[in-house]
Image (cartoon, rainbow, N blue to C red):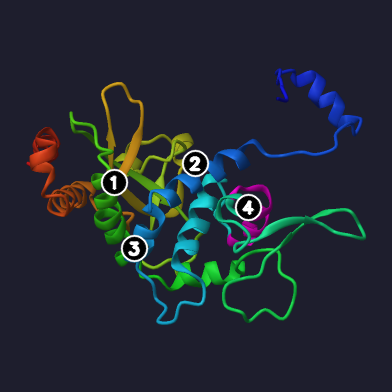
């Protein structure tokens, strides 16, 4: 049996990196991500989500489960731009979890460099590829998916998958929240609004603006935004936070009616919770006046 001991010594590691004293580097998230995808694949959660996920395509060139997995992988890496997908594939754990069908890491026979070889899914490749699917496929798929259908899917089918695996805490604690999502000042962001915000990103009404000093007014700026209303589930010890519903609306919409509708949809989508977790329903309903 081989025994490997790791000791945290940041100065030693930084000095070794400066001197080029390393043979191989592996992101710590690669192991975690591979375990994560193996888990949700083995529990059939990934396939279940793919079965109900809204798709704008009539023909499935790339399996929908892989599209869902790719988006999850990008979120795990904290990236949102689809052009970063090749980097995510190289440094992540998807290839380890999904096997050679998705791709594999090999050493180039001439250069000795590590590279990725992917067969792809649609048998249309006429060139060597280093990602299981093209990042432009992910971008177009996301762009063409109807936003309302996607949010409805998350608040109903995804939550049902969570509920069937009994992930909700029996005490039924939920938190309603609203946050502004800022976007570039481009009117092509459908439904967005330009609002006046102070230096702390708090919206400023006309009445508040007139009461400000000239110095305070100079720090205000107009910003284009949406408003994201969420319903968050947790427990009393705050061991986890689970989004169970989300709705993105115009920046000047009031969050309360949106939140009450999210609560109503959550309860209707999980009617059997009244038998399994009665406190959850009671606390959800108390949010609605």
- Secondary structure state at the residue bearing disc 3: helix
Q: Is residue 43 above or below residue 190?
A: above
241 lies left or right of 11: left
Q: Which residue is mark 1?
A: 162
Q: Nearer the viewer, mark 2 or mark 4?
A: 4
At which x and y percent is residue 114?
Answer: 80, 53
Report the residue at 35% width, 70% height from top: 146
Visible in this render: residue 288? no
Report the residue at 58% width, 52% height from top: 94
Q: Nearer the viewer, mark 4 or mark 3?
A: 4
Q: Are marks 1 and 2 in contact (CB under 8 Å)?
A: no
Alpha carbon distance from label 2 to label 3: 40 Å
* The disc label shown at residue 88, or none: 4
Say which label, 4 or 3, has the lower sequence index. 4
Q: Residues within 10 Å of mark 4 (few under 14, many from 20)?
A: many
Q: Which residue is mark 2?
A: 218
At which x and y percent is residue 1?
Answer: 70, 25
Say which label, 3 or 1, has the lower sequence index. 3
Q: Which residue is mark 3?
A: 150
Residue 156 occupies quadrant? bottom left
- Secondary structure state at the residue bearing disc 4: helix
Alpha carbon distance from label 4 to label 1: 26 Å
Q: Nearer the viewer, residue 247 or 215?
A: 247
Q: Residues within 10 Å of mark 2 (few under 14, many from 20)?
A: few
């Amino acid at each position: 049996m081989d025994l490997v001991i790791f000791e945290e010594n940041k100065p030693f590691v930084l000095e070794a990196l400066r001197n080029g004293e390393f043979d191989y580097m592996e992101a710590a998230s690669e192991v975690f991500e591979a375990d994560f995808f193996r888990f949700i694949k083995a529990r059939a959660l990934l396939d279940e989500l793919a079965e109900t996920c809204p798709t704008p395509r009539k023909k499935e060139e790339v399996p929908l489960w892989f599209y869902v997995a790719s988006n999850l992988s990008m979120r795990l890496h904290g990236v949102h731009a689809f052009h970063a997908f090749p980097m995510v594939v190289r440094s992540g754990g998807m290839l380890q979890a999904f096997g050679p069908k998705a791709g594999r890491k090999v050493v180039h026979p001439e250069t000795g460099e590590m590279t990725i070889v992917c067969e792809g899914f649609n048998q249309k490749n006429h060139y060597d590829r280093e990602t299981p699917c093209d990042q432009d496929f992910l971008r177009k798929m996301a762009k063409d998916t109807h936003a309302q259908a996607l949010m409805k899917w998350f608040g109903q089918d995804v939550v049902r998958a969570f509920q069937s695996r009994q992930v909700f805490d029996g005490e039924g604690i939920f938190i309603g929240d609203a946050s502004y999502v800022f976007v570039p000042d481009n009117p092509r962001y459908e439904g967005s609004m330009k609002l006046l915000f102070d230096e702390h990103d708090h919206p400023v009404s006309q009445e508040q603006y007139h009461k400000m000093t000239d110095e305070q007014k100079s720090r205000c700026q107009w910003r284009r935004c949406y408003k994201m209303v969420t319903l968050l589930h947790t427990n009393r010890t705050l061991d986890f936070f689970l989004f169970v519903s989300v709705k993105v609306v115009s920046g000047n919409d009031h969050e309360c009616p949106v939140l009450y509708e999210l609560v109503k949809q959550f309860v209707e989508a999980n009617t059997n919770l009244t038998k399994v977790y009665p406190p959850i329903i009671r606390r959800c309903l108390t949010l609605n006046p």
